[in-house]
Every structure is written in C-alpha cells, then in structure tokens.
Amino acid sequence: MSLLEVKDLRASYGQVRVLEGIDFSVERGQKVAMLGPNGAGKTTVLRALSGMVRTSGTADFDGASLLRRPTAEIARRGVAHVPEGRGTFSSLSVTENLKLGAYARRDGAGVRDDIERCYGWFPRLQERRRQQAGNLSGGEQQMLAVARALMSRPRLLLLDEPSLGLAPIVTRALFEVLGDICAEEEMTVLLVEQNARLALEFADHAYVLESGRIALSGEADRIKGDDEVRRSYLGY
Amino acid sequence: MERFVQVIVDGVATGSIYAAVALALVLIYRSTTIVNFAQGEMAMFSTFVAWGLYEGGVPLGLAVLTTLVLSFLAGMAIERGLIRHFEGGETLTLVIVTLGMFILLNSLAGWIWGFENRGFPSLFSDDSLTLGGVRLSVESLGIVAVLLAVVGLLFLLFQRTKVGLAMRAAAINPDSSALVGVRVGHMLMLGWGLAAALGALAGILVAPRLFLDVNLMGSVLIYAFAAAALGGFDSALGAVVGGWIIGVSENLAGTYVDFIGADLKILVPLGIIFVVLLVRPSGLFGTREVARA
C-alpha cells in the first residue's frame, strides 16, 4: 500500500478553483516530483496536504486521512513541509529554528543528536548556529528550512520549490546533499519544482501538472528521455 | 539631595507599575499585533475580584494568588471566546472590539461593586528604611522587586522553555509555526492569559496608592501606553525601561516644575508619546522592519 494515496483532490482560493481533481500516490521511500509551469497548482497540492487551503477529495496517509485537519495536527502526524519562501523564523537563532523543527518530539536527547546530524549535513549552519536566521543568505536559509523539516523525523517530506531564488551552483549543491540525506534516511519525498531538469534527476517518479490537472505521469527516467514530452510540457 | 533621590526611587516604583501594564500590552501586541485598549479595565476588574475575596475573609496573599490564576484563565477565555473571531481582520475592527470590552468591563464592575471608592490593603508594610540619609519606603522597594521578579520569570519562560520558544515562533511566523506542529491558537491564548495576570498584578500593586474604584486604571493605562510607545511596542525590555523613564520623569516634573504639580502630571506621558511618535515611531528598543530577501 502507498504511504500517500490522493484521490480527486480539489482545492480553491475563494471562488478560484486551482486543483480540478487530481489523483496521485507516493510509495514508501520513493521520491516523487510534481512538475509544471507557473500557476499550474503545484504549490497548492502541498498546501492542500498540509491543511492550508480548503479542499475536497481524499488523501490517505498511512491508513489515516490527512484532509480537513488543522495544519499543526498534520505536522504532528509526520508530514514535514518546507514551504515556498522557506518560512524562516528570522529573528530566532539558527539553533532555535532547528529546535522548533523538533517541537512535537518528546525525546530531548534524540533532538540534540539530530541537531548535530543536521550540522553534519550542512556545515554552514553550524558555523552560523548562534546568528539570527534572518541574516543568513538565501541558500543558507533554504538549508535551514530543509534541516528544520528533518528535525521532526518526518515520514513524508514535502519540498516546495527549494531552488527558488537561488544561484544555480547553490541549487545544485543543495540537491546533492538532499540526495545523500534521502539515501541515508530512506526518506519519502514529494517535491514541487519548476526546474524540471534538476527535479527529474533527483526523483524516481514524476507527475506533470497543467491547469490544475495531471497531464502525464511516469518514471522520472522515462520522462527525461522523451524529447517530445520534455519540449511540450517542461520547456527544456 | 535626599529629596531628589526619594523622588527618583518613588518614580521607579510607580514606573514599575506602568512597566507591568506596558509589558502586558507588549505581550499581546507581539503575538497578535493587537493594541489591547481593555488591558487597564481587565486589571481593574481583577483588582476588584481580589478585593472581594479579601473582604470575604480570604487572607490577602491567598486572595492575590487566586486572583492571578483567575485572571490568567479569564484572559485565555477572552482570547478564545471573543478575540479569536476577529484576529487577522481589520485593525480598526480590533480597536473597536477592545474598546467595547473596555466599556463593558467598566460598566460591569460598577454594576457589581458600585461606583464608590474603596481602600485596598497593601502587600507591603508601611515602614521605611533609611539608607545614607535617604528614606525609602518598603512599599516602593517591594514594587520594584516584584517587577524585577516578574521580568526574570518572563525571561526564563521565553528564553529557556520550549513553550516560550513556541510562543515567540508563533508571533514571528504563524504559518511556519503550524507547519512544525505548534498549535498557534494555544500560544495566543497563553499570551492573553499571561497579559491578564500581569495586568492584575499591576492593579493590585497600584490600588493601595490610589483608591480602588472603576476608574482605577484609567490614567495608569495612559502612562503604560506612553511607556510602551517610548520603549517600542514590540520590546519587553523597552516596556520596562520606558515604564521607569515615564515614572521618574512624571515624578520629577510633579515635584520640581511648579506649574505642573499633581494636577497636570498627565501631560508628561502625553508629551512623551507625542515626541516619540514624531521622532522615533518604533521607540527606543522597538524593531524597525529590516529583512533580507
């Protein structure tokens, strides 16, 4: 059975319908990319799963329904969401940001170990552990957002446009570390990304979203290899 | 010279009471960006509860403790039951809601306890100590000590505990807080509860110096606004320092500037609010929004 099984997911902001009923699933340990142009509804898929927009449909997560629950309760069930724009607690220190990631956990010693593990993955954060997070560079804040999400020991990691606003070289380094972490932790990931080339290298499986509908889906390698699909849907 | 020092110490004591109310204002403002105009009336109401318990035969210390706990619970209930419905709405709506609460609590207190003046017992003895020729009242020193203890506890709460960290996080970035599992609504309730208890403490400290009646906190609230504006509405340190500056300058002006005297002392905070808003609207310790994209 899939870890996440979504059926007929619809979402709207006021009168504007953004998702017109989409089906997709994420297997345990799988890395799934959600691709598509601006305004296709990619971010809304993640916001719907985290209870941040009004939705209908079903989203079955490890046997329990995710939809129509408060955001904090969804997070406590093991869904960690790295939001678009990184969601930094800017006037708190780097370490405090990481501690907040583990807010729902009760094992103090484990949390301290995990902070050190995060610093192992992202040495830049360790150098700046006492600084106000708002003073970090964009790339460092994105690392912090990922590390904060990992601090909850999530069963499902939602990543929203981690490449947004970052220099190509920074993005590449970030995805390299992400790949390592996922391999090490057998992490299950749902990634939303405009940079299709990068996302297809990272992911096992991909869905292409267009105007609130799934236009196509398949193995990441197959989509990458299909020139026609690449040109018409992904624009590279 | 001795007189001068006494005036300063009394000013710091009065200022500590303003600081407590200013801290309550800051607590609520930081988490919800609401300026709670009903803060003073909530404190007055709480003080009447303490008075009622005391008159009913409860020992003073126990009456005060009970009142603080009840105020904490009432503050949480007000956030959950009333303010929650308007959070994130228009600023003007919230101003009207808290002003409405101001009038409601004022009238309710009058209806329950009447409009006459009541004496309120002091928590401290009316002795005084003489230090180097300066006479300092135990009450003044006690008030300052209570404020410092409260500030210390708040510091420990916000800097050293998980709940405190979550409260700060919820104030900075509510969406992100919810995404890491912080129940933001609970944090706002907690903030209102703490503010209500802090206000109650201020009311209980100030009541023995004035008389307890429904307008007990009227001028105190204005001084507290001045303190918060001076210190910066989002700074706890600013509230305390602001409170002291207001208390001392009010006392100095009342004592040494002939035409001000006791009657025109209220001009001092109003003048300070005016100048701060003109020269440095974010206050001495307030943050001016600076962000790196």
Image: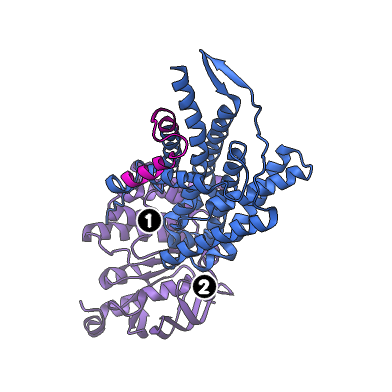
Chain colours: A purple, B blue
Q: Which residue is mark 1?
A: A88
Q: Are the residues flagged by discs 2 and 1 in contact, CB closer than 8 Å?
A: no
Q: Are marks 2 and 1 on the same chain?
A: yes
Q: Nearer the viewer, mark 2 or mark 1?
A: 1
Instruction: Using a 10 Å C-alpha cutoff, classify the residue at mark 2 as few (fewer than 14 neighbours), some (14 to 19) or many (20 or more).
Output: some
Span of residues in magenta: B251-276
Instruction: Using a 10 Å C-alpha cutoff, classify the residue at mark 1 as few (fewer than 14 neighbours), some (14 to 19) or many (20 or more).
Output: many
Farthest residue toward the top? B132
> What amino acid does circle 1 point to?
Thr
Q: Residue A63: where, in percent of width, then height? A: 59, 74
- Res A3 label: 2
Comparing B119 with A187, the one in front is B119
> Which of the 4 quarters of the picture holds residue A169?
bottom left
Q: Residue A35: where, in percent of width, then height? A: 32, 76
Q: Is residue B268 magenta?
A: yes
Q: Residue at x 67, y 58 (%)?
A: B111
Residue A131 in view (yes/no): no
Residue B196 in view (yes/no): yes
Q: Residue A65: where, in percent of width, then height? A: 56, 75
Q: Secondary structure at mark 1?
A: loop
Task: Tell me if B153 is positioned left or right of A166 in this view.
Answer: right
- Label 2 marks a residue whose chain is A
Check the picture and name the quadrant holding the N terminus of chain B. top left
